[in-house]
Image: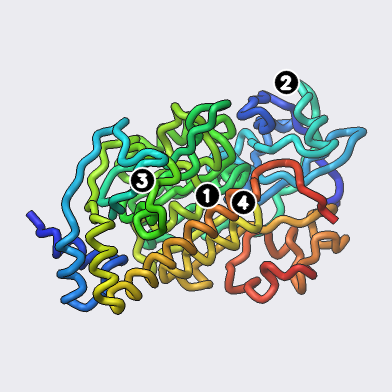
Amino acid sequence: MNPMIPNPYIIQKVKKETQDVFTVELIPAEGEQKFSFGAGQFNMLYIFGTGEVPISISGDPNKSDVLIHTTRTVGTVTKAMSKLKTGDTIGVRGPYGSTWPVKEAIGNDVVIIAGGIGLAPLRTVIYEILRERESYGRIAILYGTRTPEDILFKRELEKLKSRLDLDVQVTVDRAARGWNGNVGVVTTLIPRARFDPKNTTAMICGPEIMMKYSISELMKSGLSAEKIFLSMERNMKCGVGFCGHCQYGPEFICKDGPVFSYKKIKHLFGKREI
Amino acid sequence: MESLEKILQQHPFIQGLAPEHVQLIVGCAKNAVFEAGKFLFKEDEEAGEFYILRSGKVSLEIYTPEYGPVAIQTVGEGDILGWSWLIPPYFWRMDGRAIETTRAISLDGKCLRGKCEKDPKLGYELMKRLANVFEQRLNAMRLQLLDIYSIKVPNKK
């Protein structure tokens, strides 16, 4: 099968999450094929006549009958995508890329750190971990975004926050009075989270500068580089390592990533030239 | 009930200080509780204290005539709150409002300043620890200023 040919999918639902973020639910246009993917993987979504973009999968990896993507309206393709309606057709190639170390983290405490739209690919991890909650130690979900209006998956976060077996902390960069949650960057939540640094897996997704500061804070807490995982982003075109657009040193983000252990890319991370 | 001395000794801000210095600090400390909505301090008031927060959450706010109070940062359990007691003219630069019932150890700034003047070793130790707090807050504030979740990328080349 040619990996460059997209499969047609039908839009089942479009949901506006925040002012500039939306979720699309897709079902295969032909037959009842299942779509299996791992937490952290992405698809190339093709808007016919406009273009193709890589978008992380944000749905439950154990529900293979519907494909869920959450994205932000930032460019021509996502703008066109946000205008699609139920019943419209979209092209899908994938799933591509590496996955979060959900299985490897069994027995460990887990710290999930998300910034802005970075919560979308990490939601797949939350689904996976909660399915086998008893297999993990303490779980902290730390989420930072711009304002209270920009909080993604608000209802789900509220539900998670009410659970006694999770530590869910949300912070915003700015808020008017009336907001009784945290104000400040997501890194300020890290020292407040409870975890055993010798036995913790951390997974981070968000703007690179936010990941950089989060890594520094985690390492200050005693976590080692091999226990920290992050999802990297670069301009991807083919999604399968042919074109080289997303080359990151010796790695291709689309094929070797997007999820990397910090240990693997430590020598590249934050380098201005790369 | 744990004594103030024991609680202070276990806090990272105090840990590692010489026992005689811990004693000097304990002499300036007392417990404090602030119900949700109460102000710990208000901008332009004399900064007589600083706080080691034991539980709860405090919103640091700056009042603006156009938008009312704007929250700048939230501090919570384990955090050190306030350094205006150390820097002349010793006035708070913002409001501190409890948004949850907040328990803290309140340290008398004037009392501590006096002890630091008499014992420069204690003063230096406290200054080093406070410098760490300054650095953390400054770094967090820098990141906050970047507005990293915004779509607009300033002058990207």
Quarter location, residue B1: bottom left
Q: Nearer the viewer, mark 3 or mark 4?
A: 4
Evaluate whether residue A127 shows in this view: no
How many numbered circles are shown?
Answer: 4
Given the image, on which type of amino acid does mark 4 rest? Gly
The label shown at residue A185 is 1
Q: Position of residue A29 (x, y in %)?
A: 76, 29
Could you tell me if the residues under marks 2 and 4 are in contact, i.e. CB atoms within 8 Å? no
Chain letter of disc 3?
A
Mark 3 vs mark 4: which is more N-terminal?
3
Given the image, on which type of amino acid does mark 3 rest? Leu
- At mark 4, the secondary structure is loop
Q: Nearer the viewer, mark 1 or mark 4?
A: 1
| Residue that numbered label 2 is attached to | A86
Q: Is residue B3 above or below residue B74?
A: below
Please tell me how crowded label 3 is: few (under 14), some (14-19), or many (20+) other residues with Cα within 10 Å.
Answer: some
Please tell me how crowded label 1 is: few (under 14), some (14-19), or many (20+) other residues with Cα within 10 Å.
Answer: many
Chain letter of disc 2?
A
Q: Is residue B120 above or below residue A197?
A: below
- Rounded to the nearest whole Å, what is the CA distance between mark 3 and mark 1? 20 Å
- Rounded to the nearest whole Å, what is the CA distance between mark 3 and mark 4? 21 Å
